[in-house]
Amino acid sequence: MRSVRRRIVFSLFFVFLFIGISVLAPSLVPNDPYAIQAFYRKGAPVMEFPFGTDKLGRCIFSRVLMGTRTSVFSALFVVMASMAAGTGLGLAAGFYGGMFDRLVMRICDVFLAFPQMVLAIAVTGLLGGNMVNAMIALGLTGWTSYARLARGLVMGIKKEAYISAARLSGDGALRIMAVHILPGIAGELIVNGSLQIGTVMIGFAGLSYLGLGVSAPEAEWGSMINEAMGYMQQAPWAVLAPGAALFVTVLVFQLLGDSLRDYFGVRREHYG
């Protein structure tokens, strides 16, 4: 248990570090991320430009820092919104059952019938390529996992003795779900959410790489990779820098999710 807690603290340190960088990015950038340096295009890394410059002479290091804000905040917002919507529907479906349960599960089946990225591409293609529409697309495809998970957990809990006792004491359905059921399933939902953050970030990067995410010249890791692919042989740092930033950030959130999953599993073994 102690080693699992150390892993959680280690992961949380880097998670909050990335969040701090996202918040303070405008103050941390050494150069204007949108300023064009006409005489130093595709420049190699130097002291003034630690990650070099792109084809327009923009500081890649500054753009990577600004991209942290776009990628991390957008992913956190989408995951929290998807978790709230999916958990609410899953709670209600599992608790009430019947026609409402079947309706919610059939809707989930429809969304799950399509690969998440394909459906996201279709939605952004219909709505138009920008960050808001990309967030909507990934949110529409992300709530189903929380709904199915919450519904399955509620189905196993709602017949427990303490739920029956809450009914007999006069608690209404909403209070039972919010006070007695939700705290018991929150751990699994948090683990799922922390693992989904990395997936959503990759989804954003993928949509931006396809030109369906942020609009130029906004700094975002996927769009930076897309812009730099055409001259990768002349300036490989223009691809490697945002790619490494995406890899490390996703890895940190995956480590956090794995650590939380181990923590809640160990806690259930010790106290369940």
Image: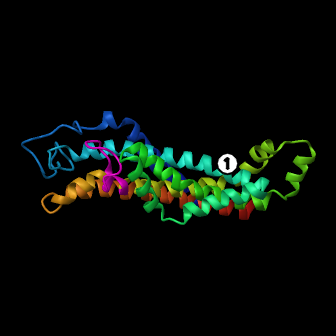
**Quadrant location of the C terminus in the rendered image:** bottom right
**Quadrant location of the N terminus in the rendered image:** bottom right
Q: Furthest-right residue in view?
A: 168
Image point 42% across, 46% down: which residue?
A: 133
**Residue 181 drawn at (x, y percent):** 76, 51
Circle 1 SS class? helix
Please tell me whether the stretch drawn in magenta is mainly helix, strand or loop: loop
Q: Please give left or right for residue 79 compared with residue 209 in the image.
A: right
Q: Nearer the viewer, residue 29 or 141?
A: 141
User: Is residue 209 part of the magenta span, yes or no?
Assistant: yes
Q: Please give left or right for residue 250 compared with residue 12 in the image.
A: left
> Dot 1: few (<14), some (14–19), or many (≥20) neighbours within 10 Å?
some
Q: Magenta region: which residues?
A: 206-222
Quarter of the rendering containing residue 39? top left
**Residue 26 drawn at (x, y percent):** 32, 34
**Residue 193 drawn at (x, y percent):** 56, 54
User: Is residue 269 part of the magenta span, yes or no?
Assistant: no
Quarter of the rendering containing residue 38? top left
Q: Furthest-top residue in view?
A: 27
Q: Furthest-front residue in view?
A: 126
**Residue 258 drawn at (x, y percent):** 54, 62
Q: Please give left or right for residue 59 compared with residue 67 in the image.
A: left
Image point 25% across, 58% down: which residue?
A: 240
Which amino acid is tagged 1? Gly
Q: Please give left or right for residue 33 compared with residue 26 in the image.
A: left
According to the picture, the residue beneath numbered tag 1 turns out to be 88
Residue 41 visible in the current orientation:
yes
